[in-house]
Image: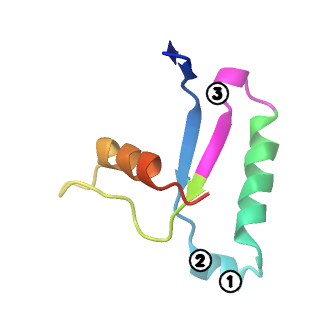
Amino acid sequence: MEDKGRTESLHAVIVPDFEYAKKAGISNIQEEIKWEINELSGGMPSYMRIKGYSIRSEPLPRTPLGKLRRFMIKDLVTEKPDR
């Protein structure tokens, strides 16, 4: 979708399990995530590919029922991307 010269693209917000990565011997988690995204995106149509991502260390905002608060996540990404 294009709006005033801007095109929407798929952006992932990733909250990795740092303890698991440490136990698995993954020293550079950002490079590992980048490699996995590129590997998975290769076989997908262009409109389904992740064009960018942010890595967050704190949990994503949720409702009391456990659903993601998507509008808050969007604000987090547009305000200060971690990557």
Q: Residues within 10 Å of mark 3 (few under 14, many from 20)?
A: few
* Mark 1 residue type: Lys
User: Residue 21: x, y in percent?
Assistant: 67, 76
Give whichever of 25, 38 is nearer the camera.
Answer: 38
The residue where tag 1 is placed is 22
Mark 3 or 2, nearer chain start: 2
Rendering quarter of residue 6:
top right
CA gap, disc 3 and disc 1: 30 Å
Q: How many marks?
A: 3
Q: Which residues fall within the magenta stretch?
A: 43-53
The circle drawn on residue 48 is: 3
CA gap, disc 2 and disc 1: 6 Å
The residue where tag 2 is placed is 18
Disc 2 secondary structure class: helix
Pointer 2 and pointer 1: residues touching (CB < 8 Å)? yes
Pointer 3 and pointer 1: residues touching (CB < 8 Å)? no
CA gap, disc 3 and disc 2: 27 Å
The residue that appears at 65% across and 22% down in the rendered structure is 47
Disc 3 secondary structure class: helix
* Horizontal relation, residue 50 to residue 42: left or right: left
* Horizontal relation, residue 34 to residue 77: left or right: right
Mark 3 or 1, nearer chain start: 1
- Residue 39 to residue 24: above or below: above
The residue that appears at 40% across and 66% down in the rendered structure is 59
* Mark 3 residue type: Met
On-image quarter of the C terminus: bottom right
Is residue 50 found inside the magenta-colored segment of the image? Answer: yes
